[in-house]
């Protein structure tokens, strides 16, 4: 945890004792629940803090306005990146959508144990969730971390982003190639790639990229297509 704290301080982010306790509780609940369901292949404490908690914070290094945003996390799994961001930025409003009920149940327990307010959880597929009028083009920021290729993710996420909002995708080493393959789809869905921020995960120095996509115009009503179609037949 000391390494985690020091790394965040280098980025101008300080953690209170309450926030440190929340991360500790998060880690222990993650490991406990992982014994009965598949949440993560990473359970070593140092690796969880680095590869999950710190990695989830990386969008905030480039977009510092999270404290006032309404964020939707698509396919959050065990809550990454949205819940570490929520811990560090308590005023952030978070909506999480995940298609697996077991994961949603874990997240419900986690949010309660961490004492987080302003978090809403939805058990739904991204393709149907994005057509609901209460959610379509309602979010300042939409995030997704290693859920699918960018061309597919864009169809899941951009319909949820309000015009002038942003879709932030957390990707690994192949990000630039994915952007090239997704550029037409992103434009079709009303987005424009603003920036691709490369970074190295500390200590192990694995490559990460934060892809910032601005929403420039409304997404056509026919997107996203029927459940299963985006991944079978990417734009």
Image (tube, helix red, strand yellow):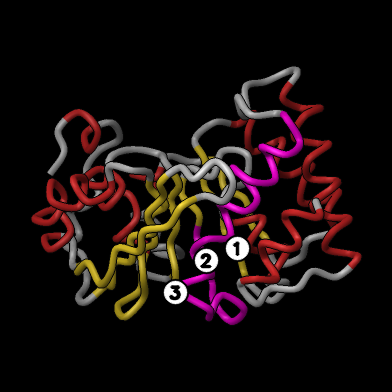
The reply to whether the C-beta atoms of the residues labelled 3 and 1 are less than 8 Å apart is: no
Q: Mark on residue 140?
A: 3
- 150 left or right of 121? left
Q: Point out the stretch of residues depicted in magenta.
A: 44-72
Residue 41 position (above or below residue 103): above
State which quadrant residue 4 falls in: bottom right
Label 2 element class:
strand
Sequence-wise first label, 2 or 3? 2
Label 3 element class:
strand
The reply to whether the C-beta atoms of the residues labelled 2 and 1 are less than 8 Å apart is: yes
State which quadrant residue 229 falls in: top left
Residue 216 position (above or below residue 53): below
Sequence-wise first label, 2 or 1? 2
- 127 left or right of 32? left
Residue 93 position (above or below residue 225): below
Sequence-wise first label, 3 or 1? 1
């Amino acid at each position: 945890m000391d390494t985690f704290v020091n790394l965040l301080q280098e980025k101008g982010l300080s953690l209170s004792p309450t926030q440190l306790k929340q991360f500790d509780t998060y880690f222990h609940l993650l490991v406990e629940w992982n014994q009965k369901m598949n949440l993560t292949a990473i359970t070593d404490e140092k690796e969880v803090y680095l590869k999950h908690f710190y990695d989830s914070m990386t969008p905030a290094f480039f977009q510092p306005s999270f404290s006032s945003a309404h964020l939707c996390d698509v396919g959050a799994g065990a809550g990454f990146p949205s819940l570490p961001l929520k811990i560090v930025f308590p005023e952030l409003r978070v909506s999480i959508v995940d298609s697996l009920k077991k994961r949603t149940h874990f997240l419900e327990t986690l949010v309660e144990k961490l004492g987080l307010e302003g978090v809403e959880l939805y058990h739904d597929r991204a393709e149907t969730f994005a057509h609901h009028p209460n959610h379509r083009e309602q979010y300042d920021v939409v995030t997704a971390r290693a859920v699918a290729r960018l061309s597919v993710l864009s169809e899941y996420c951009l319909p949820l982003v309000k015009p002038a909002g942003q879709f932030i995708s957390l990707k690994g080493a192949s990000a630039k190639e994915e952007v090239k393959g997704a550029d037409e789809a992103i434009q079709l869905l009303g987005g424009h790639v603003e920036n691709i921020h490369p970074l190295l995960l500390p200590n192990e120095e694995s490559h990460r990229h934060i892809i910032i996509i601005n929403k420039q115009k409304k997404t056509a009503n026919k997107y996203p297509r029927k459940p299963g179609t985006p991944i079978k037949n990417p734009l």
